[in-house]
Image (cartoon, rainbow, N blue to C red):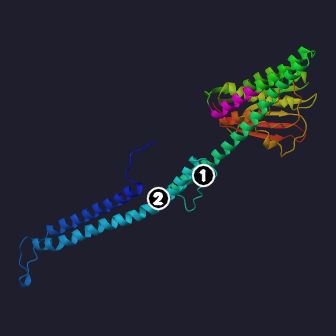
Amino acid sequence: MRRRPGLSVRLRLTLSYAGFLAVAGALLLAVVWGFLLRYVPDNTQGLLGISPNRYLLVRTFAPAAAAAMVFLLVFGLVGGWLLAGRMLAPLSRITAAARLAGNGSLSHRIGMDGRADEFRELADAFDTMLERLESHVTEQRRFAANASHELRTPLAVSQTLLDVARKDPTRDPDALFARLRAVNTRAIGLTEALLLLSRSDGGAFTRESVDLSLVAEEAAETLLPLAERRGITLDVTGGATRTGGSPELLLHMVTNLVQNAIVHNLPTGGTVTVRTGTRDGASVLRVENTGRPLPPELVPTLTEPFQRGTERVRTGEHAGAGLGLAIVHSVVRAHGGTLGLAPRPAGGLLVTVRLPATP
């Protein structure tokens, strides 16, 4: 945005300091002048023929007052210029850091030391903003690279299948169509997951009052056929647990948690336990499943996009894009909550979601 040139902040502060000092000096001289001359008679004869009248005092006092006013004005300008420069020095460092950030360098930090004041609070806030921006940009770049790689894989597989079918006319078309359908389903699921993740990251949704217990029951009812096919027992309990947010996104969150708990479970005879309730003023959702033991160092990486905790069987009902917990983390963060992951000693994972409770 182009602006017309104007006075710098330092010059305006200097003029303000000098003007304030000059006005204060003028008022002081006016008070002294008024009260001093008020009690001096116009024409009286004193001792030795000296007449200390008002006219004489005015002629004596006026030049000294004018010289004092000039001195105060010059002193105010010079002192104000130096003081303004010293006070605004931190602002120049903040401006330089902002220019570097505007040119794309997010690794620079102001790192202003000293005691707390307004400029140092601004510098600390600016450093925090740069740190979050750098982390966000790095995460988005890594996510874009991973997403392009994941989306390229099903397209490459489809192209290979079509090339093989063209070179081999005797190939069974039903098997080809079945494989193409599976690959296409995976690509569609991955695209929908990416769109959902982008929507939850942007926070573009309308908040309503949502009962997590009802959401958990709906998700369990939807995934019950999958659990029965795998021999997994679903146990959903809990009272009314209200929070504010998007019913659709929260349903996706719970569905992803329960679906991951079913898929990453024992081959048969496993359990998935879903609990809802209120604790310490927060709405809590706990999803716990049996399964293989997880290394503790692997757990913090599970919420990163395209990270898979264990090897899973690829089926048409669950393509396994590696975005389940990433979507959960994004939805929880968009709703102002926290997500906790803890490996169970006997194997499996315990996921705890804490969201702000509403009446």
- In the rendered image, the quadrant that contains the C terminus is top right
Choose between 315 and 332: the one closer to the eye. Answer: 315
- Residue 10 shown left or right of residue 72 in the figure: right
Choose between 168 and 171: the one closer to the eye. Answer: 168
Residue 197 sits inside the magenta stretch:
yes
Q: Residues within 10 Å of mark 2 (few under 14, many from 20)?
A: some
Under mark 1, the amino acid is: Asp
Q: Height in image: 47 above or below 129?
A: below
Q: Height in image: 135 above or below 178?
A: below
Residue 97 image position (x, y, % from top left): 56, 53
Q: Height in image: 272 above or below 93?
A: above
Residue 352 sits inside the magenta stretch:
no
Choose between 167 and 60: the one closer to the eye. Answer: 167
Q: Is residue 330 visible?
A: yes
Q: Main secondary structure of the magenta part?
A: helix
- Residue 10 shown left or right of residue 165 in the figure: left
* Furthest residue toward front: 167
Q: Which residues are magenta?
A: 190-203
For disc 2, the marked residue is 88
Q: Residues within 10 Å of mark 1 (few under 14, many from 20)?
A: many
Q: Which of the 4 quarters of the picture holds residue 275?
A: top right
Q: Measuring 74% from the left and 38% from the top, which residue is drawn there? A: 145
Q: Element under label 1?
A: helix
Residue 31 image position (x, y, % from top left): 22, 64
Residue 179 image position (x, y, % from top left): 87, 21
Which disc number belongs to residue 127? Answer: 1
* Furthest residue toward bottom: 48
> Of marks 1 and 2, which one's residue comes earlier in the chain?
2
Residue 140 image position (x, y, % from top left): 69, 39
